Amino acid sequence: MHLLSAFLWLGSLGGCNRIEVAESWQIDRMRVLAVAAEPAEPQPGETVTFRSLIVSPDKPVDCSIWLACDTDGGYGCGLSGAAGATGSGTGDTGAAGASFVGIDPLTPLVWTVPEEFLAEQTEAERLEGRSALVTVLSVAECDGLLEGDIAEAEALLEGSPDEVEIAYKRLPVSLAPTPNHNPEVIGVRVDGVEVAPGVRVELEAAATYRVEPVLAEGAVETYAYRTEAGEDEQRVEEPYFLWYAQEGSYDQTGTLYPQTEVEYTTPAEPASPEQSIWVVVRDRRGGMGWLEVPIRFR
Amino acid sequence: MAGWLREKGLRAVLAVLAGLIGPVSPARAEEPPPEEPPPLIKNPQLLEFVQAPYPPEAQAAGLEGKVILELEIDVTGAVVSAKVSGPAGHGFDEAALAAAQQFVFAPAEDATGPVPVIIEFEYGFTLTAQPGAGEGAGGGEGAAEVAEAPVNLEGVLLEMGTRRLLEGITVRIEPAGSAPGSDGLDAVTDGEGRYAFRGVPSGEWTVRVRHPGFLEMTGAITIIEGQVTEAKLWLKNQAYGEAGVVGAYQREKVEVTQRTISMAEVRRIPGTFGDPIRVIQNLPGAARAPFGTGLLIIRGSNPEDSGVYVDGIRIPLIYHLGGYESVINPDLVEGVDYLPGGFGVQYGRSMGGAVDVTTKREFGERPHLTWSTDILDSGGMFTASLGKQGQHGVGIAARRSYIDLIIPAFTRNSGFVAKPRWYDYQLKYIYQGDAPYEFSAMVFGFEDVLIASTPDGFAQGTDQDTQGDLGTRYSTHRLVINYERPLTQTLSLRAIPSFGNDYGEFTLGDSWTATNSQNTFEVRLELPWEPSEHFRLVPGVDFLGGWAKFSVELPFNPELFAETDPFAEREPYGVSDTQPGWGPDTYLFAQIRPLADPDQLLITPGVRIGYVTVTEELSQTAIDPRMTVRWAIQDKSRLKGSVGLYSQPPQPFQAYRDDGEPVKLTPQYSLSSTIGFEQDVGQGFHGDIEFFYKHMYDLIVNNPELESLNDQFFVNEGVGRAYGMEVMLRQDPVGPGFGWISYTLSRSERRDHPGEDFYLFDYDQTHILTGVGGWRLPGDFEISAKAQYVTGNPTSTYASGVYDIDLDSYSAFSTSAYNGERLPPYWSVSARFDKLFTFKTWQLDLYLDLLNAIHGINPEFVIYNYDYTESDYVRGLPIIPSPGFEIKADF
């Protein structure tokens, strides 16, 4: 405890130098920012459709490879042995336990949860559920992949990390009476003025704005939870928001509901007059939503 | 300095010149004199002057004379031989020789202690002045008419700043306007610093006092016929703080590796803030702590493996937050024993090193106040001796930090603000009477609090359960009683009971709380038996008992142990328990001095038998045999070595198990061995080299098979090894300068579980080179500096990882083995400037401590960006100018 205290204090004194590393809100390379499943919390046998927020500062992302698997953990699904290389996911799994969901934009991103996914769980555990994993390999250049060449995908994985961004997400599967839904961001307020999705916002350079997300009605859900002692509770989601920008800076990386506002300071000399900022919301139960806000610097 | 009176042509009248004369040659007649005699830190001081009868022949003839004598003074202060080197004839030589052979001196001392010396001594005879000195020293037979004259000039001689009464110093008065060294009268101060002159003719006089170690003092005095003139004289010490420099550390050097630094050095070392306990961070064997936090990383051991003691009683921490100040007021500290290894069986329950802080055992006769202020805190201490003859010594000290008020001013624009604060206090009573026992009682304690907060509206991460202020608080309070008395001529008793509480607390927002409170009762009993100077046997008991109560409350899902699931719902979870623990360690050691000269060889075998009940279900016994040897193979050369077993019981939290099943843990062990060599080079130079090897086994590490709260958290599967060499070259502060160079070459490794590879200990530092030096300048200025080079700590490296979308975090890939890489080396230079102002009753020391004057890269940690594609160093502390002042006053 003493050691922790000492380090906290001394670290706050400066650690004592300015740390020169990129901030997480800076979109200076290809990033997978969010993945959402629909439905957000399926039942066994249900078919799920995926969508993603993959961004890049300079050009559109070429393609992404999607896998799903039944696993207790790890860092995602193995690519080797994935079944159905170019077809839509059927729930079949390969030798490594992964099933091929699809390649975006070549195939639809759908996956059917295996019927037996909760077969080994008790009744209570089925209500609580367990998670499958979905892995996304975002690829900057993927000509071969678009032709369905799985060997090309394996080669890409061994290449420069700059060309591939690997991300994974859990997909909760349950028989919960109040299954989760993805929260929806339907706009933002900039200095108190609401901006609808898709509308480009004009901002001054080197200026600071208060930005807060606007959630759809019912985005913050109430759900049932059975405690370890077997008592049923009604709990309310506590979503949080992460903010991203191509240039400029935020006063904090994330905000917690209901205090969702950040201060965004625009760059003094923007590299391009038209850019975007993004906000991603997570409901802590596997549900995600996001909004891209196009901006123009005056 | 020797013989300056002669050079000036002064006619000393029975002058006591012992203090004015330096060593001519060592007094070991059978040995040739060395090339350069070692410098003395204390000149011989004449304690008993013997008045020579005035030779009748010379008196009748009206002759005066001055005899130059060569006196050989042994280590007891006795004059063992005397001869006339500058005869005066007329019976003066014989009279002076006979008298001088009866003189008694306080012996001269060099850095090693009392030494024999030969001095020159002027013995003067005059018919015109009262011979011999002040009233207390008695008059001479010669000049009877003067001796019978009334005292008409008297007073007392004191040391400026300390009001110390100065004894045995010659006060000289000369007619005003006469050249220095012309005719005058002399008197020598007595044991109470008094001097007196009889029959001083009326008129203007110049009083002059010159004495080694003091600045010359002159002043004007007017003698009026029929009146007694009183004059209080003040003499300014040339080197305040060096008085009793070596004596600051009382304990006999019996440990193999016991490094002591004088208080005079301590005060001048940059970065220590005058704190003697911080000095150990500059000694061999002590690794550099991150950010200078003061963690005790000794000979490759974990910080928690080293024990810290105050007057023999263990306390959990020795430094306040950040490690810049120790928890005991520096002015109350008498000595600090730094024992990096090979220490005796008196110290137990530690595998690493030991630091034993001894507080003062005596307070001065006069009320004394110290006060110090720097950028971190302010505090003071007041001591006084009360009652008849001052048999009741009382000291009270306290200190409070204010860094928590300063930091926010510099972190206004950052989201995260840490506000540490602390206080400490000490109250000590010492019996200083004549009764045949020693008794003291001390109450002391400290509290440290750290609040780290973010402003309203700022999220502290994205976890809803980690919002709010982060706080830690820990405190220690102790009552320690020390009682020692002889039981017989050969047997004595030492008893140190203590009682106290240690408390620690961690909070995060409203949902996380962890507290631990330990009420501790400790008793140390020793019965030293010393039938001869060749043998000493010390049986002892070190009882430690008490009960610990801990509680943890946090939002938690036990399934997290089985699977990291960010969607797992949390519930309030709490654990609390009260566990008694006690252990009567017993020990026995002998100090055997088998050779005729008892100082030549010291063998200290011993054994410590530790029994401890960590919890009700876990009791353990450990037997630690140890032995040390110190052998003076020559007068100034010593060999030393040790081998021993050091055990350390599990901590109560390590012995906790949620399901109440017995925990299977044994003590941790370190088999430690050392061998070394010490050499006194002369001129106050010492050299010390030591090699060590430690084999650590049964180390308590995390249970790799932990799957649920019902499993045992820790297992005894770790092993380790640490080995190296330590070198220290040191110049004692015998003159205006002091300094040392310490170098440690070492390697420390660990292996947590069987079958795994060894990895470097987290604080393994191959090379630690430290140079410390100081120099006193004219005008009471001092400058000192410290330079340090240290190999960078081991670190692990990572590369870009996989993004966990649900947690918004990247799981990095290791690109090295654990601790497989190193940070760049650490290099720093610090300096300190002091200016001392001395007034009659008080002193003011203004100083500027300039920490990290050369601000190098000095990385402490590697910090990565969010996706591990970039990294930077968290660097050590920047340049920190720390001004401060210290006041010392006597009343």
Image (spheres, coloured by chain):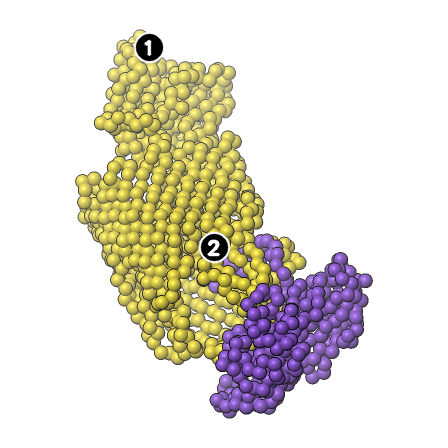
Mark 1–mark 2 Cα distance, whole angstroms, equals 83 Å
Q: Residue at x 46, y 23 (%)?
A: B207
Q: Label 2 belongs to which residue?
A: B822
Type of amino acid under label 2 = Arg
* Residue B75, x across and y down, in percent: 27, 33
* Residue B550, x across and y down, in percent: 44, 71
Cβ atoms under marks 1 and 2 closer than 8 Å: no
Element at label 2: strand
Q: Pick whichever, B690 or B376, lies toward us.
A: B690
* Residue A28, x across and y down, in percent: 66, 63
Q: Label 1 belongs to which residue?
A: B63
Q: Pick whichever, B570 or B521, lies toward us.
A: B570
* Residue B11, x across and y down, in percent: 39, 16
Neighbour tally class for label 2: few under 14, some 14-19, many 20 plus, Cα within 10 Å: some
Element at label 1: loop
The disc numbered 1 marks a residue on which chain? B
Q: Pick whichever, B831 or A26, lies toward us.
A: A26
Q: Colour of chain B?
A: yellow
Q: Quadrant of the N terminus of chain B?
A: top left
Q: Residue at x 35, y 63 (%)?
A: B719
